[in-house]
Amino acid sequence: MATPTASAALNASVFASGDQMLLTITYSDAETKPLTVTIVVTDAQGNSSAPATANVVIDPLTVIVTDNSGRTWTRVSDNGSVAVYRSVA
């Protein structure tokens, strides 16, 4: 099994108390795969429905952000490969 990879960067290296901190995380896993399932129903006379599709992700990833101060991090966005979290210094 492949191990997920991640890298993270903050929007600054030094913060004053009360400053907004933005954490950008880039992540991936070679085994995470999108899959589209297509279904067509056919009756005994050969009449078929229009195709219906369902999209799924096999082996999805979950991002969890914590720090050693107990600060709360709020997800701003996450497109499945880049996530942005916000907190206050």
Image (spheres, rainbow, N blue to C red):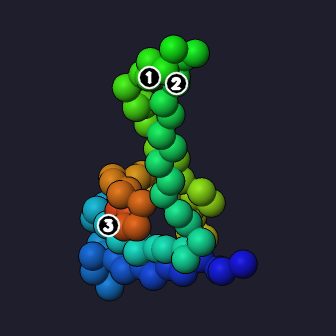
Q: Residue 36 carries which label?
A: none
> How many labels, in total?
3
Q: What residue type is labelled 2?
A: Val
Q: Residue 41 carries which label?
A: 2
Choose top left, top right, bottom left or bottom right for residue 3: bottom right
Disc 3 designates what residue?
22
Q: In the shown orientation, is residue 9 left or right of residue 35? A: left
Q: Which of 78 and 43 is in front in this view?
A: 43
The local secondary structure at tag 2 comes to loop
Answer above or below: position of 76 versus 83: above
Q: N-terminal of the two: label 1 or label 2?
A: 2
**Could you say where residue 40 lies in the image, as x and y percent from the top left?**
48, 30
Question: What residue appears at the point 50 percent right and 79 percent down from the top-left corner?
Answer: 6
Disc 1 designates what residue?
48
The local secondary structure at tag 1 comes to loop
Q: Residues within 10 Å of mark 3 (few under 14, many from 20)?
A: some
